[in-house]
Structures are given as structure tokens and as C-alpha cells.
């Protein structure tokens, strides 16, 4: 199911400013909504669907029912405990309920924005990009699902001399890369497992397309940082890590590898979306474990960081 | 404590590479011990000065005040008890024990007597007091009845001005009842000539035949005061000599002998060593603080005037950098042994035992070159070693600042105790030029206190802080047709009718009314200033301090009487951001979008947003853009608020206009210490969505919690304000979570952030790097966090010494997270 995106109108959640972990310098990161993968550990579940989502904070709710009455599509109802259940199949993300809720318990994630409005917003922090060697990062979700929109935004940013980064999981057709690459200075590329079967188990998709796109990027000499997510017990076996690193080592345009260890920061968002977090109970890595993993992957001759 | 990961950022500091010093290190045990002794001292009330000045004033009835004050200083300095702390090398005490506050009955005394039994029971800024001290102070109570500065001020204040104070629009600050302070001596000159050289100038002048009686009195007073100051140093020389004789430890014995030697010759001539130079600077500070009970006596451009003495000793091999660092650290600790007690209602406006003694390093020199030198770095390191509220350390930076100085500053900021604050020369210099100073003069600026700037050694007294104006209250009164809902007092009316009912037809009408109300209350504040000024001229006549500042000795006048070369005054304007945020809500919801009527909004404010309908209006109000998010819609309205005040200023002059000093006009300042908390308590709900009693905004910072787009947006919003016309100082306070600055990469980004701040044309910036959880814990368990120092406003204080309301405001200040 590929969503129909309008290349003149982006669907984003937020622009995160003073972003320090999405590439060099001080950056503004745009979070695009919609993603073809369903990673078990996803820490931005509110960015998976390609329509706006309503986030519900139970603790703020006064159970007054104002939102139920306000919803034109009948997507809201009391659940058996007297709190609000959102039917995400019916909800079209119009956001009326969020405006009506007296407690601010409902929040709309996802807004449509024009190319010019987004460019204007991103240029606001130009001075910080200049003093820090930073710029703009397109992230998500899977930003390439909105490649036509990003191409227009990035084109305008390049005309202004702004450094641009694409942060992608790569699970899209190559044509989408081709659309944006002329305006992208660096690609942050996620490789979640090397084993395709495991990849399907963990993300819902094979990784053939992802590995192929990575090779194509390298062939075209596009500067890349590869990001290896680490999930305890799922994709961190020595064999799996070495296999991933061997694949990465063949990509000649890779400048750096960032290990992204599992964390639970996203857990609260699952609750607010009315979803279960599949990996809620995994232990987080200790510093010693991370150092051990780092030393295991370092011999491949590429600079490795923890966290980027 | 965050220790440096690697030294990549500051490996090359010219001249001081080979030091013991390491960040957060323990290489200077003496400094740690002297600091620990200071921290163990409990603030107390000391009666000595009060008794001595009473005795002196009794003896000098009928003499001109400036002479009476000189003689009083002489009596105090000759008779007060003196001591030298263990292991200290810098000497000079202000009261009978470390951190005790002397009493200054000549300024105001009724409150002292009234609060005698409460000093030890305060919720912040506690002072121990013995029954003996209470009795001694009660014993002189009768003498001061009707004789104080405060008595004179209150006899003159008009009824309408008192009414404005009852409305809580005007707060007459310290100087209706205390001295003013805000003086930076001309250190270069004092170091070169000594008090003896300055005294010689007064003696020469006394030989003139064309003197007015006023000039003759001043010169005589100057001679007496400087002689008393020199003799004061001789008392320490004598004491150190006695202690040396009894001392058994040969190392300390030699030190005491050195102290005796320095203090027996000091002030006769040019300072002979780095040690002596520091002692000269400290004495100036100390004696000014015994002469008068102002605050914000400041050190100016420390690295500039002290450098020749440092350099000479280093080159001659008499001093190592480690010794220099230790001496500066001891000098810093010594400043913290001084104290000031204020009435409780003033304490709320500036909590944390503040003295606001600013000490500045770095920045452009008058000739256009950069002034950074080894002492600039040593001062930052001394601050890292001492970590105490004084001095209020500031760094000036500009395009020519070495990256190493900015990196060292950033590292110190990361340590999380609020220092240094940073001033951007490219904005402050034009701001000083906007009031008519030539560029080479403006380049020599330094802060005297928090963010208020002056030309060191050449500035009349008081840059700021005389009369506080509560913008939030003015808005509330205006929205109630001129009536203050709390007191019921109405001094003017929007529609010509008495009572609270009012209607506005357009935003333009709202704006014009704001300007009218602002002028009405500013007129009153200026009138109030003039009254305080006229009385300070008499009661705060300061022959000692005046001898240290340019043109007083030429003119034969005290600073308060127009002796300073330059003389500007600022009031302190509180709540500029909240007014802009409130106006944005009125403009957007009532007039642009017509979502609610003015009457609906007023009713919601009256109800303090309570009730379902009012909550709905409040939520609407919260969606209107707020200052601090880089949104032009509201940022421009906040800028308008600044303009509305700035455009009033050319119409005002001080009492010294035409008396000699250049200027004698008003400047604008947002240096408002912790007043935004108590002033907020007085203001009802405001249209921006704030509940009654909550703090208004601090300085030029966004309203508490209003900035949601991160730290870059805050800098952008502030950059749209008329910063280059804020000659009285523009204050921006930010809070970062500690993790944001961890590691070299993040620190590099933070330095880039500081650079961007400068390029954006902002005036000043300072930080708290501490997470809210730690602050909350410190509020609950003060005993575990005795050392936790935070930025309150333009100054730092130990968190546990603050009143609870100010602690809450600091906790609520938005914590910026990098993601």
C-alpha cells in the first residue's frame, strides 16, 4: 500500500531544532510521517501511519466526552473503563477533537505544510548552521515516501547553501533516491539486519531492496553514514553484527558507522496511540556491553561511534 | 561534576600551558581549605559599624554631611575589630566575623529594629543574631529617629507616588532606604598612584583660592577618607606582624611577614607586585562597602588593569602561574566574606545574599584590538576552583576573541553553576554609542552588577535598579480602566469614567492606551528617582568612593553630586515579554480573528481562568504565538513594548543634568534580579494564559515555559528586540539539561550556539546547566545540596539560600533539550 503523496504538500510531525544527533553541527530535523517498515522497536510509532494521528494522554483526560461529540467521523468512544478509545481506522486526522478537549488530553500529530513554508521555517536557524557546520536533516518515518516534496525543499535549501542530510531506512524504490540525491550532501542509512529472513521478522519487510539501494548509493559515491540499530537478543549476535559490518565495509562511500542501541523512550507514545509496545521489557545495554560491541565491529576499518 | 573528557578544546592557552591546573582538579588544597572555612561561616548581623557611626555622628552634629561621613569612616576603620583568616593571603574584613553583615543606620533603621527577631527565621537570606546585638541596636534606635535617608525620602514622596506604590506598579528599590553602590573605581589609576597619590590631588586642590565651600568640604573629606583607608591597611600590617611572631609554622610565618610587608607600604605609591595589586583592588571594594551599603560595587575589566602587575612578576621570576591562580582564587573567596542585609520586602527582589560584584574579562580594547590575556584565563580557572556567588564573573566576546577563551567559558558554563555570563561586544558597544559615547570609550565598557553596563572608573553612580516598574501590573490596571483590582486604587482612567468597566474597539486603541499608561507611571517613577537622588546626594555622600572615580577630584564633587565623567540611570522594567504575549492574545483573539469579545476575555481574567468556558478561552490563548519561539507575529509586539518605553526616555533627565557629567539621562534595562517573582505575585491573571500570582517573565527571557521551539528559537526571538539601544543592559537567562553539553562534540555545538548568539546581535546570555530533578531534590533536601549554585537573574546564588517561590521559578524555567 503506497500512499499517494502530493509533492507540493508535505506531511510532517515537527521540525526539531538544535538537533545534535542527526549529523554534524546544529541541525533542524524534519520528521516526516509514514513508513513502510514496522520495526518492533520503533521509537517513533506516531510517525508510522501516513495520515495524521491522534495521541491520547489518559492521565490528562477528565472523561467528559466532549471529544466524542465533536468527532465528525464517529472515531471516538468511551472504552469499558470510561476513558477514550480512538478507532484509528475511522479517524482521518482532522484534529477537531484535539481543539475541543478541555484538558488538552488529545494531540494531533501530523500537519500538512507547503514547500515554501517549510523552507522558511528551516532557514530561520541559518546562523546556527553556519557557526556549527550544521544544516537540515530529513528524517521520519521514512522521508523518501515523500521524495517529491523533499526534492523541492532540498533544492531550495541547496540554493541557499544549506547542508542537507537524508536519514532513511532505504526500503523504497530507487527512483525515489534519484529524485532527491542531487540536493543531498550526506545519507544516514539504516541497516537493521543483514539476514533477510530476520529482517522480515523484525520489520515486516525483506531487506533485499534496502541492501541493493545501499550498493547503488555507494556505486554513485554518495557520502553515507550507516546506522546499525542494536536490539538485545534480536540482532546483536556476533555473527549478525559481523555480517552487517562486512556488507557495510563493501560500501566504499561509507564514512562512519553509528551504533544506535535500543532504548525505551518511545514507550509512552505507544500507550498514547492505544498500541502495545512489543519490546517494552528488554533490558537496556550497559556501557560495558556497548564498548564490547564497538570493539567487535571496529576492526572493519570504518570509524564507529555509539549514538552518532 | 563533569570532568573534561579530553583537552582538545583548550590545549593551547598562550602563556599558561605548564600549570598544575586540571579541570575540576584538586591541585590547590589551600584554596579548598579557605573555601571550606568560608562556607562554614553562618551569616550574622554585626552591630559594630552601627555603634561606631552613631558615636561619630553624635560628635559631628552641625558639620557638612560629606565631612561627617568622612569622619565617620575614619572612626569605623580605626576602631572596628580586624582579623586575618587562616591561610588567607588577602586581608580586610567588613564586620566582626566572616559573612556577617554590618548595619548602616544612617540610611534607614526602623526596619532593622522591626525585623530584629525575624532575621534568623526568614525563609531565605537568613541572618543569625544574638540578644546582645539586638540590645545594642535597640540602644541607638532613638538617636536615628527622623534622621535617616529614608525619613527624608518619605517626607518628600507625593501622595500619588505612594498610591502607585500601593498599586504595586512602582517599587522604590533599595535606594529609598540604602546607599546605591554600582561603582567601578578607576583601578588603573589607583594602582598607579595609590591612595596617597589621589590624596595628594585633593591636598593640591585645597590650596586653590577659587573653591566653593562645597568643593572645599569635598576635598577635605577626601583627604580624611583616604588617610583613614591607608591607616586601615596599616592596622592589618601590624596585626600580620604580631601573628607572624607567634606563628610556629615557618611557611605561614613567612606568609604573614609578607602580608605585613605589603600592607605596611601599600598605597604610598604604585603597587609593587601582583599580590599587592590584588590587595589594592580588594581594599577599594571593601572600603566602599563599609562607607556605603549599596551593592554592585564592581571590578570592571580585571584582566586589563591587573595584567601589567602579573606580567612584571612573571617576567621577573617572582611569580608562577600556579601562584597567580591561587592568589586570584583567594581574592575571589575573600569577596564572599562580605555581606549585606536588606529589609525582607527588598530581599524578595534579590534573594541569595547577592552583592552583584561583577568582574569582567576579555573583549575588545579601546584601540580596537583584543584584550584577552593570560589573566583572562586564570580568572576563569579561579572561578572553577572557588565556585562561589562572588565575583559575578562575566566574559566579553567579539569577532576577535580567541576561540580558546570561548571554549574555556563554555567549559565553565558546562560545570553548571551559572558562570560566566557572556556579553557580546558587537551589541553592547553600539548600545553604549546609542547614548552618545564615542566608540573608543564605549569599547571599554564593563558590567556594574548584573547586566547594567558602564565605563569603569569614569561613570557616575548607579546604572540601574532604582525604581522597578511592574509592566504586568500596568497592563492589568489598564484592562481594568485604570483601577487596580487588588487595592481598588484608580489613578487614571481609559474612558474618563471611574470604576473598572472599559471597552476597547480596536487593537490600535489598546496599544495607544498602553503607551498612555506607561508614560503616566514612568513619569511617577522618574519623579520618585529624583527624590531619592536629591537625598542620596546628602545621605550617601561618599568621599572615599568618589576619590576613586574620574572627574570627582577635578570637580570637587561627590559622585552623587555630579562628580562622574559620565552619568546615566536606568529604571528596571519588569515584564516586557509577558506584555507582548498578552497583547498578541488580545490582538489575535479579540480583534484579528474575533473569536472572543474583550468582555469575555476580561471575565475570564477576573475569574482567574476558572470555569469551563474560561478554561476554553485560556486554551485558545495558549495557542496564540508566544515570545521565544521565533514567531514574528508576537516577537514584533514584544519589540513594540520595548520601543514604547525607549521612546519616552529622551524626555527624562536626572537631578545632575547640567551639573557637569556627560549624559544625565535615562537608559532602558531589563536587569531585574529576582523581582519577576514577587512582582508576579501582585499581578492577576494575564491574557497570555498566565494564572494570577505566577511569576512574570525575567529580563528579556520568554515567559516561564512559553518557549517550546528550543534554544535557537529563543535567541532568534530575542534578536528581534532593540538590543542595540539597551544601554542599561538586556538580560537573557537560559537553562540547559546537563546531558546536552556532555562530550566534546556537544561542547563544540554549544560554542557554535554562543557564536550564533553574538552574530544575531544579542546583548547578553547566561545559563543554568542543571536538571530540574536535582533542583527539586535540593528544594526538599537542602542539606544535601549546600554547594549547588544557580543563576538567579543577573547574578548567581546558592540555591538553598533562595526563598521557595524563587526556587520554583528557577525549576520552571524551560529546560532546553537537544535531541
Image (cartoon, coloured by chain):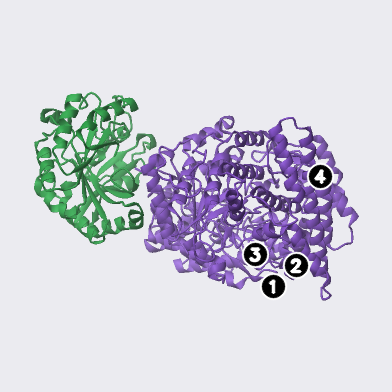
Chain colours: A green, B purple
Q: Position of residue B526 (x, y in %)?
A: 65, 65
- Is the residue under label 1 in contact with that under label 3 (CB below 8 Å)? no
For the point 70% across and 39% down, which residue is it? B255
- Is the residue under label 2 in contact with that under label 4 (CB below 8 Å)? no
Q: Position of residue A52 (x, y in %)?
A: 24, 45
Which residue matches tag 1?
B660
- B335 relative to B426 in the view: left or right: right
Numbered tag placed on residue B193 in the rendering: none
For the point 54% across and 48% down, which residue is it? B695
Which residue matches tag 3?
B458
Label 3 CA crowd tier, 10 Å (few <14, some 14–19, many 20+): many
The verdict on a common chain for dots 4 and 2 is yes
- Is the residue under label 2 in contact with that under label 1 (CB below 8 Å)? yes
For the point 73% across and 35% down, which residue is it? B253
Indicate the quadrant containing the C terminus of chain B: top left, top right, bottom left or bottom right. top left
Examine the image and state in which quarter residue B151 appears.
Answer: bottom right
From mark 1 to mark 2, how far is it between C-alphas?
A: 10 Å
Placement of B566 over or under B779, stated as above or below: below
**Quick one: B197 or B102, which is closer to the camera?**
B197
Examine the image and state in which quarter residue B235 appears.
Answer: top right
Which residue matches tag 4?
B80
- B750 relative to A45 in the view: left or right: right
Label 4 CA crowd tier, 10 Å (few <14, some 14–19, many 20+): some
Q: Between disc 2 and disc 3, whose residue precedes?
A: 3
Q: Secondary structure at mark 4?
A: loop
Q: Secondary structure at mark 2?
A: loop
Which residue matches tag 2?
B557
Q: Between disc 1 and disc 2, whose residue precedes?
A: 2
Amino acid at each position: 500500500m503506497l500512499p499517494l503523496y502530493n509533492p507540493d504538500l508535505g506531511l510532517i510531525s515537527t521540525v526539531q531544532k538544535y538537533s545534535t544527533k542527526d549529523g554534524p553541527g546544529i541541525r533542524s530535523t524534519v520528521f516526516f510521517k509514514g513508513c513502510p517498515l514496522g520495526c518492533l522497536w520503533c521509537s517513533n510509532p506516531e510517525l508510522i501511519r501516513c495520515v495524521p494521528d491522534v495521541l491520547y494522554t489518559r492521565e490528562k483526560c477528565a472523561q467528559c466526552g466532549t471529544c466524542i461529540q465533536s468527532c465528525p467521523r464517529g472515531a471516538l468512544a468511551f472504552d469499558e473503563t470510561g476513558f477514550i478509545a480512538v478507532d484509528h481506522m475511522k479517524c482521518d486526522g482532522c484534529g477537531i477533537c484535539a481543539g475541543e478537549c478541555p484538558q488538552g488530553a488529545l494531540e494531533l500529530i501530523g500537519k500538512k505544510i507547503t514547500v515554501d513554508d517549510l523552507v522558511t521555517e528551516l532557514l530561520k536557524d541559518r546562523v546556527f548552521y553556519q557557526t556549527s557546520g550544521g544544516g537540515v536533516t530529513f528524517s521520519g518515518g521514512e522521508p523518501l515516501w515523500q521524495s517529491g516534496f523533499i526534492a523541492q525543499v532540498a533544492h531550495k535549501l541547496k540554493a541557499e547553501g544549506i547542508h542537507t542530510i537524508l536519514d532513511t531506512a532505504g526500503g523504497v524504490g530507487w527512483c525515489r533516491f534519484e529524485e532527491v540525491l542531487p540536493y543531498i550532501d550526506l545519507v544516514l542509512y539504516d541497516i537493521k539486519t543483514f539476514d533477510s529472513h530476520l529482517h522480515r521478522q523484525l520489520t515486516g519487510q525483506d531487506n533485499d531492496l534496502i541492501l541493493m539501494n545501499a550498493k547503488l548509493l555507494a556505486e554513485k559515491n554518495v557520502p553515507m553514514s550507516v546506522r546499525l540499530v542494536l536490539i538485545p537478543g534480536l540482532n546483536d549476535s556476533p555473527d549478525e553484527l559481523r555480517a552487517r559490518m562486512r556488507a557495510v565495509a563493501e560500501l566504499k562511500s561509507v564514512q562512519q558507522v553509528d551504533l544506535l542501541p535500543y532504548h525505551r523512550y518511545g514507550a509512552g507514545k505507544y500507550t498514547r496511540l492505544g498500541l502495545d509496545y512489543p519490546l517494552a521489557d528488554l533490558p537496556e545495554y550497559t556501557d560495558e556491553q556497548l564498548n564490547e560491541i564497538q570493539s567487535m565491529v571496529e576492526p572493519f576499518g570504518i570509524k564507529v561511534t555509539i549514538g552518532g | 561534576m563533569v570532568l573534561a573528557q579530553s583537552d582538545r578544546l583548550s590545549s593551547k592557552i598562550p602563556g599558561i600551558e605548564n600549570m598544575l591546573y586540571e579541570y575540576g582538579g584538586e591541585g590547590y588544597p589551600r584554596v579548598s581549605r579557605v573555601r571550606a572555612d568560608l562556607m562554614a561561616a553562618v551569616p550574622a548581623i554585626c552591630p559594630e559599624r552601627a555603634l561606631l557611626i552613631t558615636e561619630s555622628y553624635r560628635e559631628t552634629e552641625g558639620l557638612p554631611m560629606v565631612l561627617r561621613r568622612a569622619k565617620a569612616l575614619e572612626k569605623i576603620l580605626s576602631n572596628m575589630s580586624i582579623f586575618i583568616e587562616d591561610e588567607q593571603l588577602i586581608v580586610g574584613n567588613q564586620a566582626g566575623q566572616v559573612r556577617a553583615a554590618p548595619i548602616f543606620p544612617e540610611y534607614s533603621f526602623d526596619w532593622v529594629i522591626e525585623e530584629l527577631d525575624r532575621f534568623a527565621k526568614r525563609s531565605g537570606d537568613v541572618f543569625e543574631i544574638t540578644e546582645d546585638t539586638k540590645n545594642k541596636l535597640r540602644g541607638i534606635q532613638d538617636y536615628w529617629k527622623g534622621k535617616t535617608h529614608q525619613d527624608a525620602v518619605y517626607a518628600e514622596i507625593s501622595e500619588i507616588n505612594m498610591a502607585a506604590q500601593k498599586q504595586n506598579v512602582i517599587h522604590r528599590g533599595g535606594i529609598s532606604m540604602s546607599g546605591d553602590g554600582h561603582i567601578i573605581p578607576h583601578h588603573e589609576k589607583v594602582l598607579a598612584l595609590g591612595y596617597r597619590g589621589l590624596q595628594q590631588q585633593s591636598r593640591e586642590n585645597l590650596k586653590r583660592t577659587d573653591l566653593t565651600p562645597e568643593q572645599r568640604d569635598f576635598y577635605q573629606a577626601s583627604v580624611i577618607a583616604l588617610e583613614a583607608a591607608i591607616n586601615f591597611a596599616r592596622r592589618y600590617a601590624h596585626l600580620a606582624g604580631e601573628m607572624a611572631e607567634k606563628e610556629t609554622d615557618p611557611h605561614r610565618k613567612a606568609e604573614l611577614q609578607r602580608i605585613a610587608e605589603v600592607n605596611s607600604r601599600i598605597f604610598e605609591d604604585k603597587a609593587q607586585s601582583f599580590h599587592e595589586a590584588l590587595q589594592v583592588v580588594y581594599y577599594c571594594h571593601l572600603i566602599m562597602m563599609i562607607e556605603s551599603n549599596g551593592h554592585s560595587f564592581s571590578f570592571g575589566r580585571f584582566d586589563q588593569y591587573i595584567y601589567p602587575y602579573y606580567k612584571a612578576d612573571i617576567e621577573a621570576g617572582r611569580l608562577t602561574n600556579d601562584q597567580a591562580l591561587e592568589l586570584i582564587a583567594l581574592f575571589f573567596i575573600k569577596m564572599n566574606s562580605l555581606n549585606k542585609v536588606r529589609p525582607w520586602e527588598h530581599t524578595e527582589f534579590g534573594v541569595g545574599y547577592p552583592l552583584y560584584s561583577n568582574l569582567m574579562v576579555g573583549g575588545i580594547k579601546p584601540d580596537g584590538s583584543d584584550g584577552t590575556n593570560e589573566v583572562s584565563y586564570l580568572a576563569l580557572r579561579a572561578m572553577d576552583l572557588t565556585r562561589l556567588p562572588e565575583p559575578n564573573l562575566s566574559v566579553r566576546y567579539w569577532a576577535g576573541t580567541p576561540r580558546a577563551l570561548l571554549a574555556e567559558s563554555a567549559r565553565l558554563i558546562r560545570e553548571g553553576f551559572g558562570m560566566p555570563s557572556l556579553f557580546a561586544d558587537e551589541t553592547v558597544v553600539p548600545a553604549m554609542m546609542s547614548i552618545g559615547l564615542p566608540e573608543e570609550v564605549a569599547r571599554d565598557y564593563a558590567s556594574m552588577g548584573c547586566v547594567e553596563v558602564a565605563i569603569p572608573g569614569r561613570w557616575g553612580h548607579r546604572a540601574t535598579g532604582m525604581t522597578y516598574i511592574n509592566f504586568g501590573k500596568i497592563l492589568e490596571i489598564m484592562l481594568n480602566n485604570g483601577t487596580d483590582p487588588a487595592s481598588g486604587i484608580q489613578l487614571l482612567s481609559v474612558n474618563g469614567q471611574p470604576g473598572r468597566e472599559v471597552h476597547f474597539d480596536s487593537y490600535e486603541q489598546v496599544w495607544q492606551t498602553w503607551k498612555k499608561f506607561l508614560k503616566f507611571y514612568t513619569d511617577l517613577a522618574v519623579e520618585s528617582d529624583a527624590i531619592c537622588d536629591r537625598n542620596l546626594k546628602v545621605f550617601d555622600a561618599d568621599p572615599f568612593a568618589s576619590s576613586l572615580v574620574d572627574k570627582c577630584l577635578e570637580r570637587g564633587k561627590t559622585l552623587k553630586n555630579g562628580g562622574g565623567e559620565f552619568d546615566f540611570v536606568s529604571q528596571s522594567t519588569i515584564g516586557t515579554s509577558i506584555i507582548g504575549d498578552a497583547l498578541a492574545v488580545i490582538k489575535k483573539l479579540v480583534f484579528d480573528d474575533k473569536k472572543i469579545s474583550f468582555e469575555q476575555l476580561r471575565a475570564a481574567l477576573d475569574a482567574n481562568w476558572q470555569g469551563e468556558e474560561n478554561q476554553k478561552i485560556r486554551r485558545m490563548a495558549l495557542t496564540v504565538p508566544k515570545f521565544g519561539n521565533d514567531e514574528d507575529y508576537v516577537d514584533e509586539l514584544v519589540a513594540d513594548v520595548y520601543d514604547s518605553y525607549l521612546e519616552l526616555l529622551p524626555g527624562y533627565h536626572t537631578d545632575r543634568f547640567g551639573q557637569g557629567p556627560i549624559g544625565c539621562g535615562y537608559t532602558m534595562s531589563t536587569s531585574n534580579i529576582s523581582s519577576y517573582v514577587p512582582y508576579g505575585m501582585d499581578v492577576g491573571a494575564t491574557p497570555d494564559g498566565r494564572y494570577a500570582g505566577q511569576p512574570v517573565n525575567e529580563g528579556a527571557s520568554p515567559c516561564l515555559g512559553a518557549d517550546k521551539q528550543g534554544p535557537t528559537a529563543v535567541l532568534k526571538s530575542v534578536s528581534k528586540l532593540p538590543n542595540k539601544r539597551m544601554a542599561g543592559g538586556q538580560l537573557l537567562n537560559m537553562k540547559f539539561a546537563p546531558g546536552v553539553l556532555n562530550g566534546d562534540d556537544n561542547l563544540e555545538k554549544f560554542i557554535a550556539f554562543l557564536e550564533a548568539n553574538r552574530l544575531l546581535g544579542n546583548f547578553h546570555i547566561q545559563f543554568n546547566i542543571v536538571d530540574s530533578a536535582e533542583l527539586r531534590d535540593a528544594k526538599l533536601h537542602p542539606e544535601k545540596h549546600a554547594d549547588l549554585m544557580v543563576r538567579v537573574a543577573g547574578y548567581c546564588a546558592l540555591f538553598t539560600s533562595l526563598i521557595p517561590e524563587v526556587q520554583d521559578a528557577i525549576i520552571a524555567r524551560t529546560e532546553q533539550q537537544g535531541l
